[in-house]
């Protein structure tokens, strides 16, 4: 299966840090061509209105990433061996340095020219977001010397993962201090210029970074648990799904849902039984918003809300075996709204339900005081609210459903008296169940650090810890790359090398 994300990723593997470092002017030219909104300042032809760059960066950052759906055992392919489904991926790209980070840095530079602190604050958020995801993907990455081609740094050094994570925490703290109610934010397709919502996202994302580092006690000068408690107790955080850090799609060119009209989604993508069975066991109607009935169930006239009408394929079986389920009319496709509805649902990089699950985990670990149960319950309720708000005709799926009864059911109810591992499994399983086409690779990284939920794997196959560095880096920045590999992985660049954050 070659969906649009896979194709784009493969075409961009050629990017190296050196190409990125000297590409600044090309990126700006791209903005002029693609966005057609360059300021015509005769005294500064390279000037770009920061609102244009904010729109561009936001649209890029918030797209859906479909590859995680295979790795996280939510979907399967039936027309060929998908590398993510079978845990066989290899190298990845550094293209985000040009597509995201360089444009973010330019936005911040333009913000300084007009003395607008809010663009600078949002820029720090995007820097943190991009570097966070890059470091989780690879390990050590260029950070302190990244995107400094104009300063002559064409072969930036690699910083340790601890340096990166501590650095972006500090950048987010600075962002929180900078954000204000006075400086106007235009071009904002996420929060429509509402600085208070950006502040909530910034602080909530600080907590996301800290909980992701749960295997560690300290991060640079930060004590992780203490810093978490300080932020959670004193800073503005998301309080409802209206605060979600999400992109709403529109039925217009270049603004439609990421997977709209995707041929693979319409023909060869089906649900994984592991994911479906979690919902069936809990009689959870969110399933009906993710999956389509099996062909046999449709032909039998079963109601959409009949759980027996849904079945998935085994993500560890061969794609040909799963294709046989199609012939047998006994496998569910992905719900067609994901490829037929141009607006579908918003795509989040962090949501209020995710924040509440993070707070629940922190309470369970003793990082913050109080019971984890209110946070856990709030997270589940907010997830149902999201789908009842954004899925078309929600009554056909949720009529008669009582979320309080659901929260009291045996497989769902949270009990503070249970052993810690049982409580963590409850939290992480429900968190996982909210992330179908949401929050990008978060569900997979949660699995790597907690072991929950317990993904099915092929015999003899382990879940990869990381991606290999781009091949181009070996040609254009080999000295720094090899030094980073030696410091992290004994010189070995493979997907089973365990990065610092998981040790």
Image (cartoon, helix red, strand yellow):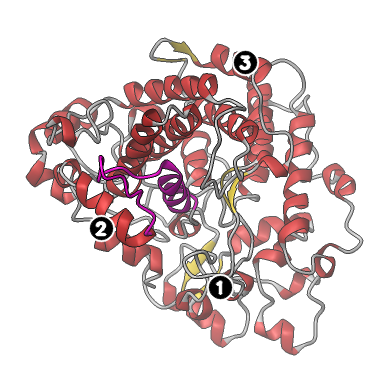
Sequence-wise first label, 3 or 2 = 2
Quadrant (top left, top right, bottom left, bottom right) of the C terminus: top left
Tag count: 3
Q: Does 48 lie within the magenta span?
A: yes
Q: Nearer the viewer, residue 146 or 23?
A: 23
Instruction: Give how far across and how far down residue 262 sits, in percent.
Output: 47, 74
Residue that mark 2 sits on: 12
Residue that mark 1 sits on: 339
Q: Residue furthest front?
A: 42
Instruction: Give how far across and how far down residue 391 sits, in percent.
Output: 72, 63
Q: Residues within 10 Å of mark 2 (few under 14, many from 20)?
A: some
Task: Tell me where the magenta segment starts and ends, as one range.
Answer: 36-62
Instruction: Give how far across and how far down residue 340 sits, in percent.
Output: 59, 76
Instruction: Give how far across and how far down residue 404 sits, in percent.
Output: 88, 45
The disc at residue 229 is 3
Q: Nearer the viewer, mark 3 or mark 2?
A: 2
Locate residue 141: give its quadrant: top left
Residue drawn at 40 percent across, 33 percent down: 111
Q: Nearer the viewer, residue 487 or 321?
A: 487
Sequence-wise first label, 1 or 3 = 3
Q: Residues within 10 Å of mark 1 (few under 14, many from 20)?
A: many
Visible residue check, residue 488: yes
- On the rendered structure, is 113 left or right of 295? left
Residue drawn at 33 percent across, 36 percent down: 105
Sequence-wise first label, 1 or 2 = 2
Residue drawn at 18 percent across, 40 percent down: 21
The disc at residue 155 is none
Quick check: 406 above or below 5? above
């Amino acid at each position: 299966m070659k969906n649009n994300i896979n194709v784009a990723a493969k075409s961009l593997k050629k990017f190296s840090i050196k190409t990125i470092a000297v590409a600044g002017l090309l990126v700006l030219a791209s903005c002029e061509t693609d966005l057609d909104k360059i300021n015509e300042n005769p005294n500064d032809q390279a000037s770009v209105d920061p609102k244009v760059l904010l729109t561009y960066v936001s649209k890029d950052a918030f797209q859906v990433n479909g590859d995680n759906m295979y790795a996280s055992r939510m979907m399967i392919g039936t027309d060929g061996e998908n590398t993510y489904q079978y845990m066989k991926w290899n190298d990845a790209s550094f293209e985000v340095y040009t597509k995201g980070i360089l444009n973010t840095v330019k936005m911040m530079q333009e913000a300084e020219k007009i003395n607008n602190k809010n663009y600078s604050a949002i820029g720090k958020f995007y820097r943190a977001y991009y570097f966070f995801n890059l470091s989780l993907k690879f390990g050590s990455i260029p950070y302190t010397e990244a995107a400094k081609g104009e300063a002559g740094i064409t072969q930036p050094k690699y910083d340790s993962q601890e340096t990166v994570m501590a650095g972006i925490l500090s950048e987010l703290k600075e962002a929180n201090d900078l954000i204000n109610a006075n400086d106007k934010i235009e071009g904002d397709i996420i929060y429509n210029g509402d600085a208070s919502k950006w502040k909530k996202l910034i602080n909530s994302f600080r907590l996301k970074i800290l909980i992701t580092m749960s295997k560690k006690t300290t991060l640079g000068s930060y004590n992780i648990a203490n810093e978490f408690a300080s932020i959670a107790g004193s800073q503005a955080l998301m309080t409802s799904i209206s605060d979600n850090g999400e992109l709403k799609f529109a039925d217009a060119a270049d603004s439609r849902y990421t997977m709209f009209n995707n041929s693979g989604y319409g023909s060869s993508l089906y649900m994984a039984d592991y994911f479906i069975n979690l919902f069936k066991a809990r009689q959870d109607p969110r399933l009906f918003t993710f999956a389509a009935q099996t062909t046999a169930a449709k032909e039998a006239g079963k109601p959409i809300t009949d759980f027996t009408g849904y079945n998935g394929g085994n993500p560890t079986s061969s794609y040909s075996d799963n294709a046989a389920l199609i012939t047998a009319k006994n496998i569910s496709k992905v719900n067609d709204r994901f490829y037929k509805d141009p607006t579908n649902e918003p795509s989040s990089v962090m949501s209020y339900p995710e924040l509440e699950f993070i707070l629940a985990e922190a309470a369970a670990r003793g990082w913050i005081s109080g019971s984890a149960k209110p946070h856990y319950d709030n997270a589940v309720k907010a997830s149902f609210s999201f789908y009842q708000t954004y899925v078309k005709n929600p009554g056909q799926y949720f009529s008669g459903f009582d979320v309080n009864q659901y929260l009291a059911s045996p497989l769902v109810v949270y009990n503070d008296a249970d052993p810690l591992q049982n409580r963590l499994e409850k939290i992480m399983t429900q968190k996982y169940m909210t992330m179908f086409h949401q929050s990008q690779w978060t569900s997979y990284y949660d699995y790597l650090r907690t072991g929950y939920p317990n993904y099915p794997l092929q015999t003899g196959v382990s879940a990869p810890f990381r991606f290999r560095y781009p091949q181009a880096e070996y040609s254009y920045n080999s000295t720094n790359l090899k030094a980073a590999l030696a410091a992290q992985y004994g010189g070995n660049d493979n997907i089973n090398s365990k990065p610092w954050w998981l040790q």
